[in-house]
Amino acid sequence: MNKVYLLALIASLTMGTTSCKAESTKPAEPADMIMTNAVIYGHRDADTLAVYDGNIVYIGSENGVDAYRNTQTQMIDLEQAFVMPGFIDNHNHVFEAASAAGGNCELNMDASLAEQVPYLKACRNLAKENEWLMGYGFSVDSVLSEENDTSPLEVIDRIFPDTPVVIMEQTSHSMWVNSEALKRAGITKDSSEPQGGKILKDQDTGELNGILFDNAGDLVMEMAWNSLENQFDTSYDGLMTGLEIAATHGITTIGDGRLYWKRGWYEVWQAAAKEGALTARVSLRPWIYPTDSMDSQLTYLKTIHSDDKSGLLLVDQVKMYSDGIFINGTAKLLKPYIDTYIADEPFGINYIAPQQMPSWLDKLNQIGFGAHIHAIGDGAIRESLNAIEYVRSKGATRPYTLTHLELVNPRDVPRFVKLDVTADFQVGSDYIAHHDHSWAEPFLGAERSSFLMNLKAIFDTGANVTLSSDWNVHDINPLVGIAYSIKMGATGLPDIDSAIDSYTINAATSLGIGEITGSIDLGKSADFAIIDKNITRLPIEEIVYAEVIMTVLRGKLSSMPMIINLVACTVFTICLHTI
Ligand SMILES: [Zn+2]
């Protein structure tokens, strides 16, 4: 797609021509927008779409669209661009991924413990008297390497003797903290460990080493977060940036990765919705706090519940963690880890205990919530399926989704379709496309590592499979996930149509909104990702290079990334309407 083409495309937002019949709603309404000269996914014989009041009212040939056109109708000649259903990213941390609210002390993910020192020193400039300093970017295996002769705590304390500091690891499943942070959080070597968390200690001395796994770290981060002023404004700005990036990639609906509602995030989302600033439909997923009582959380959740599909914000699914992650030894396994940082928990741990999950799901169902459950280890996956089996047996019909699904025991593979549970995967990183899971061998051994990330096994049972980015863990670009899921070969998805479904209609089903979006069908919301090339005809390697030229949500342009990149938007009225 070149500049001349794009400018021609803008110039074509004028009048068009008419006559005849095709798929359409009756009676014909004058359309707000008609798109002609399009290649439309799923409608080989059509080249024209008409949109009225945010919904698709006509799919057919240009000759038949006449009845929908009047002088007010916006006409767009797409010059053979490819119109797809808007992408639905079933698991995306859009609120956090591009935000500075979690701190801007940035370390180096690839650095050893000693190599982090200059990065930490550089962060001293960001520290404010008596305020928490927050940041991100380290890897657990580097800072806990047996080759280090000092502990992470000693290193960070030397640079920050007084300022409380909490640094998040990239997966968000561990925090590196200093002694002042531990003191403020009331954590000592004698503290009991919170549900879903581990307080790490030096194996020889039994002293704290400054690393908190999973929920132990979440609790400290929450304390830091809530102590800072201006978090609302910083979060709002971060959300706007995140949404804008999502829109440039053709994403029209987002399944929220998690809503930390005790950090004021819900209020930020509400403000964005009120101001008409949402460029995507979003299923907000309030997080279930493992250490808070069920009753208090249910009471709050009732107050924010919304399943009004006419709005852009839905709040009818929770985010629940069953377990942690393999590298921490916190993902829950059916058989013990080969090596783990937490030898006292050889099978890993649970955020929500398996004895509690059935009751959680049951009570949530009664107040209108389904669940999107983080389950990585084969133990957590089995336990989560058991909990869903329980609520299904009690008549629960809401959508349930298990996400990540890195290691699934063969016995559990057929249970997804049987229990009507969506299987959500993230594949948008090179090592997954190449099925290189050597990183997991020290923890799981070669055999279990070879079974990791098998989409095909679950897909073949007929279960609903979705792809998502978990942004910013993987690439936000849906075309990367789509291409890589096919590139995976024997463990991936079989073809381009299955991959597209996984990023569109299947994800809509997982969110409980399959009847309003996820495909180009009459009466559905006019949510489109308009791409410069027909990706169903491209070699797999070229799919990721296709470009989104327009994103349309409910018949309105929510992004024109290439145009925005090309010219100052003030030149074009169309941009003024879209950013
Ligand atoms: Zn996530």
Image: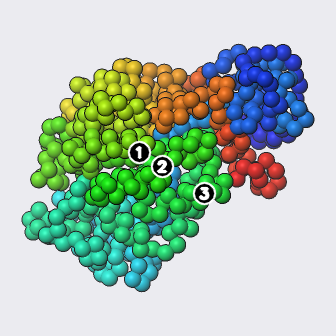
- Earlier residue among tags 3 and 1: 3
- Return the residue nearer the eye: 506 or 540: 506
Find numbered disc 2 in the image and state the secondary structure of the residue it sits on. loop
The residue that appears at 66% across and 40% down in the rendered structure is 553
* Residue 77 appears in the picture as rendered: no
Determine which quarter of the picture holds residue 425.
Answer: top left
Amino acid identity at mark 1: Ile
Residue 384 higher or lower than 293, as above or below: above
Per the image, the residue denoted by label 2 is 305
- Taking the image as shown, residue 481 lies to the left or right of residue 443, namely right
> Which x, y percent locates residue 327?
26, 49
What residue did someone put label 1 on? 367
Q: Amino acid at mark 3?
A: Ala
* Distance from the alpha carbon under mark 2 to that under mark 3: 17 Å
Q: Helix, strand or loop at disc 1?
A: loop
Other-residue count near label 1 (Cα within 10 Å), few / some / many at <14 / 14–19 / ≥20: some
Image quadrant where residue 392 sits: top left
Between 304 and 562, the one nearer to me in the picture: 304
Q: Are marks 1 and 2 in contact (CB under 8 Å)?
A: yes
**Circle 2 crowding by C-alpha within 10 Å: few under 14, some 14–19, many from 20:** some
The residue to which callout 3 is attached is: 272
Q: Residue 325 vs residue 562: left or right? A: left
Q: Say if 320 sits above or below 493 in the image.
A: below
Task: Respond yes or no on whether mark 1 lies under 8 Å from ligand 1.
Answer: no
- For this rendering, which residue is in front, 294 or 257? 294
Q: Can you tell me whether the CB of the residue at mark 3 lies under 8 Å from the nearest atom of ligand 1?
A: no
Give the quadrant of the N terminus. Answer: top right
Name the amino acid, label 2.
His
